[in-house]
Image: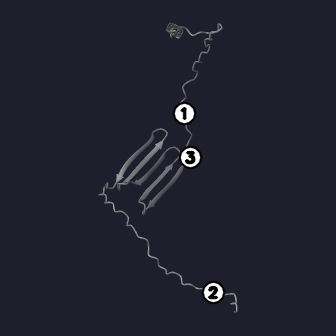
Amino acid sequence: MYSKVTLMCLVAVALGRPDKPVPTGYGYAPPTPAYTPPQPSYSAPQPTYEKHEKGMPFDFEYAVKDHYKGVDFDHNANSDGKVVNGQYRVVLPDGRTQIVTYTADHHNGYQAEVTYEGEAQYPEPKPYKPAPSYSAPAPSYSAPAPTYEQPKPLYVAPQH
């Protein structure tokens, strides 16, 4: 019995060898692929930055100033159709005002000059104070007084 089991194990190991070729079965061999990838057929893109349409002249300006929130900025620009000139200002969180004056055209690109007005302020932070806790308000009303009378009987008492 022991020899039969050993013989079966040896046969199983021999059949399951990794160096044995994969059976094709019924004489079938998988076909070799005949596909060849196509060669790239593209050309370099043509630059489009040299051709530009003439711009339209414009002139605009806006400003926002909110003292409650501390918001203060404005922007203005004008163009003759070829060159745009403008300026914008914004108040920074440190108290300074940043001013950007710019010129933009298709030949020189965007040229900006940045300046600052004022001195940066960094105040000491105040210590945190939690909001006061409130108790429930005392009622400002009294209980309503009854507006009804004692009910009267609707029946007549029986006589003895």
Q: Which residue has dot 2 on it?
A: 151
Q: Which residue has dot 3 on it?
A: 56
Image position, residue 24 (x, y; %): 61, 9
Helix, strand or loop under label 1: loop
Is 140 drawn above or below residue 102 in the view shown?
below
Image position, residue 60 (x, y; %): 51, 53
Question: Is residue 154 shown left or right of residue 89?
Answer: right
Is 123 drawn above or below residue 151 in the view shown?
above
The image quadrant of residue 117 is bottom left
Mark 1 near mark 3, Cβ–Cβ under 8 Å? no
Label 1 vs label 3, nearer the camera: 1
Helix, strand or loop under label 3: loop
Farthest residue toward the left?
Answer: 124
Closest to the observer: 155 or 46?
A: 155
Give the Cα distance between marks 3 and 2: 91 Å
The amino acid on which the numbered mark 1 sits, given as a three-letter code, is Thr
Mark 1 near mark 2, Cβ–Cβ under 8 Å? no
Which image quadrant: the C terminus? bottom right
Q: Name the residue located 41 percent from the left edge and 49 percent from the top edge.
A: 100
Q: What crowding class fits label 2: few (fewer than 14 Cα within 10 Å), some (14-19), or many (20 or more)?
A: few
Question: Is residue 146 shown left or right of residue 103?
Answer: right
Q: Earlier in the sequence, mark 3 or mark 2?
A: 3
Q: Which mark is residue 48?
A: 1
The amino acid on which the numbered mark 3 sits, given as a three-letter code, is Met
The image quadrant of residue 91 is bottom left
